[in-house]
Image: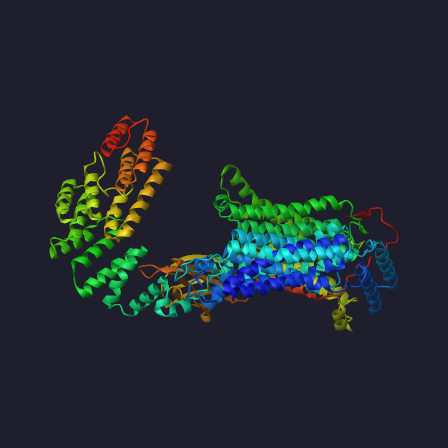
Amino acid sequence: MIVEVGHYALVLALALSIMQAVLPFWGARAHDARMMGLARPIALTQFAFVALSYAALTYAHVVSDFSLVNVVENSHSTKPLIYKISGVWGNHEGSMMLWVLILAMCGAAMASFSRAIPPRLFADALSVQGVLGTAFLLFILLTSNPFTRLIPAPIEGQDLNPILQDPGLAIHPPLLYLGYVGFSIVFSLAAAALIGGRLDAAFARFIRPWTLLAWCFLTLGIAMGSYWAYYTLGWGGFWFWDPVENASLLPWLAGTALLHSAAVMEKREALKVWTIFLAIVTFSLSLLGTFLVRSGVLTSVHAFASDPRRGLFILAILVVFIGGALFLFMLRASSLKQGGLFAPISREGALVVNNLLLTASCAAVLVGTLYPLLLESINGDKISVGAPFFNLTFGPLFAPVLILAPFGQLLAWKRGDLLAAAQRLFFAAGCGLAAMAVFAAVNGAPVVAFIGSGVAVYLIIGSFVEIFGRVFPSGLGATKNAFARARGLPRSAWGTAFAHAGLGVTLLGLAATGWGVEKIVAMKQGDIYDVGPYQLEIVALTTDQGPNYSETTAHMTVRRDGQTVALIAPSKRFFSTRRMATAQAGIVTLHFGQVYVSIAEPNAQGLIDARLYWKPLVSLIWIGALIMAFGGTLSLSDRRLRVGVARRAARIPASAQTAG
Amino acid sequence: MIWLIFALLTGVAVLSILWPLSRPAPKTPEDAADVAFYRAQIAEIDAEAERGAIGKDQAEAAKAEAARRLLAAAPEETAEASSPMTRKVAALLALVAIPALALGFYAKIGHPDAPDMPLQARLSAPPAQQDFAAVVARMEAHIKDHPDDARALELMAPVYQRMGRFDDAVKAWKRVIELEGETPARLLQYAEALSFASDGTITPEAQAQVERALALDPKNIGARFYLGLAAAQNGDKDKARKLWTELLPDLAEKSRAKQEVVENLAMLDAPNEAAPGSAQESAPPADAAAAVASAAPEEQQKMIRSMVERLAQRLATQGGSADEWVRLIRAYKVLNETDKAQDSYDEALKALSGDAAAREKLAALAQQMGLKAQ
């Protein structure tokens, strides 16, 4: 009964979504405050129904109700409880449920926390949210219904793909989806602003918290996904320029650009049209990511044809929303009032450069992701666009972003002084060069590694130069009241500094991979191998029985200069239901670097094929992402209005430009 | 009960629209939010100036800019009170559309009478109420704990066979025979399981079981049939013919078994016809004969039909050799479906129109079966 109640609740949620799409919109046209106000209760009730439905599905997974096809195909009675719960979103139908749950949650959040939004904008935005909900609920109910029953019910399920039976799965998709779907609010607000035909600083103010929130989640989601790939796939890679990963990177790049242009819009009312455009593009890329991952188009364009209903449905959603929003944009953009003026060398100008570089690198990734798919669907050629392409295109486009980030913080609004900014960065640049020299001397080649780490050091220090300047206005000598001044600084300024520094930390981790050591060996008990500064030895081999797998574990010691510094236990698990094996890498973090070992089954002679890695500073890649998200959260917690105070220009510069 | 909950949920959904509509309208003007925003912005500038974060003239400039924007935020067209008619239509829409949509859609895709089936509840239900899968699971659990319970094994072995788990059936029969000794019936079932496990081929191991069964009971009909089948599969048509012909007098007149053997004999004699089950690819007879012989009568009929259907489908979509068409036509004739036999015959003629030898063969068959030649 619970299952069917959940099923019915989902259908009711669809009916409510349709109401949410129609009634407030109609109310806004008819100037009826009560009908516009309907957006709020409908969004909340709809969320309640989707949540009820999701809970029912989770219940079915937890009690192993094998009368549901979805449970049979993705669960097993012996699976540990946590994977029964996380397994709900570890499959196509369930992950779409999670998508819709978060979408409804975003709608409900907007309904609850956005009292200050003008009522028409609010009604239109929740209407757009309702249209989104309708589309995705229809998609679930018509093509991917998790409540499809199977009677008579089998007694056992087919288990979840073992790779997904990992704590990483429990965390990664929800974070990622919160990021993806969080941008839907920004999209809805942008569409509503275009429908209503008004766009001002207030609008930028409303989208700021949602953009920041979505961006933080997306940052964490991508980092988590990358760390998960790193420790489960067993060859120590953490980013493969795989289309699925690119699908999450694309909205991140566009979202980062949006974050910056929205700041300009809020403070200076400039870049309005561009901000709206980015809001549309960011969510469109989230939808594209969903399409790529969920339609099966990635495994092969032919897999897309094998389930055409699903793929075509998502494609139709994609076309309607992206096409519709861009059409609206085309109709309305020219009528939007242009915003504030600024000189090319100014905070605004720097943010424009940032936006150009970010969108260009986003475009490069997009081309690299879609080109192979297009080519395959046109003439059937399978090509793979891998790291070399992205290193050559994305790299050069993104490198200036890293160099210029500290400049942007130091330039004043409206009219900046580039020379002064550069002078203030001398110290950071000096540190960067010194670091480069030290790294080159100590660790040596490859060149990319020490140049990259130098830039990273410059970026980390440069990120705090502006804060430093404001806390110690007259140099380090005047420490009086420094603490008070630091506290008085807007938290968004601290947020910016931390987010930029986080980028630098990630870059440092990435650059240091160049010094990594990799060995592929056939080991036996007692053999000692040098990996970087450490010696690894297998001291014991054990075989254990897990709840739904059997496991061979190699217990190894990690020694340095004769001292045991850590024990690691890489293992190989065999899942009998799916007849699949997974590798559990043995990892230990030492001074931000990691010793990483992944093993294969022992062969007849007792030899174990093992991959041994020493990855200096590798953990900084993810620590950097955490710092970025921390910066975002700091900025999010800053609820004060932003005022971009322009420096008074003695005269209107001849080069003053209008940006829009 | 479940309909009560559905009604309750639907009520909540409808009320979430009707109730707010019936409340008095908010009094705030539509541009209140904008005014509030710019007021707050100006206040913020003042606060910044007081803290000394920005200079006095800077603050003045910023305030002027904010004020300009406030003026520019065009007041929206004043909200004329809309007619209550609109709201009534909206309320009616919610009242009708939500239940209609939800119930209509759910009626199409839902299973309101399907209960929840948590695994634990299914396994611990009293035996009489247990579903088949749960019983199997319990039996398996029992066998796992008591690997020497021959009775349980003997009960489960045919179940495994039915479920298509032939390897498990083989293991079960082997163990039963080890524990309880050989009987012709057990040996034959074991042989059957063995041959099913290797796609219907009577393997040497299976044949050994059949021969032991025959040693225990020289007249055993099943054993003699299988020996014939094994011979046929090995291409020894004469031996097969001899065994099966000797079998005929021992079979009841008009029984299915007799018909089956006659049919098999006919296939042996068919010109250029592959021996029953000799080739994997074109060989429904291989597992067919074994399966048919072992199945219950009503099952037999079903199995034969499904095999014939498969063959017919394959021939219709992919075409086939003259022999395969002959087999199909003959099968229809045996099943007493003369119409279908005739249709297949016509189709075969069409499909093989370019092949003179094939047409000749078909014509001979038509005559033999009493079909209308074209």
Question: Measured from the top left, where is residue B211 in percent x and y?
Answer: 14, 53
Q: Is residue A626 visible?
A: no
Foreground residue among A190 and A237 = A190
Q: Is B299 left, or right, of A343 in this rendering? A: left
Q: Quadrant of the C terminus of chain B?
A: top left
Residue at 82% x, 46% y: name it: A655
Q: Is A550 left, or right, of A94 in this rendering? A: left
Question: Measured from the top left, where is residue A267 in percent x and y?
Answer: 78, 57
Q: Is B191 left, or right, of A640 in this rendering? A: left
Residue at 31% x, 49% y: name it: B302
Foreground residue among A293 and B285 = B285
* Quadrant of res A581: bottom left
* Quadrant of res B269: top left
Question: Measured from the top left, where is residue A650 in percent x and y?
Answer: 88, 53
Question: Measured from the top left, where is residue B205 in percent x and y?
Answer: 19, 53
Q: Is residue A659 visible?
A: yes
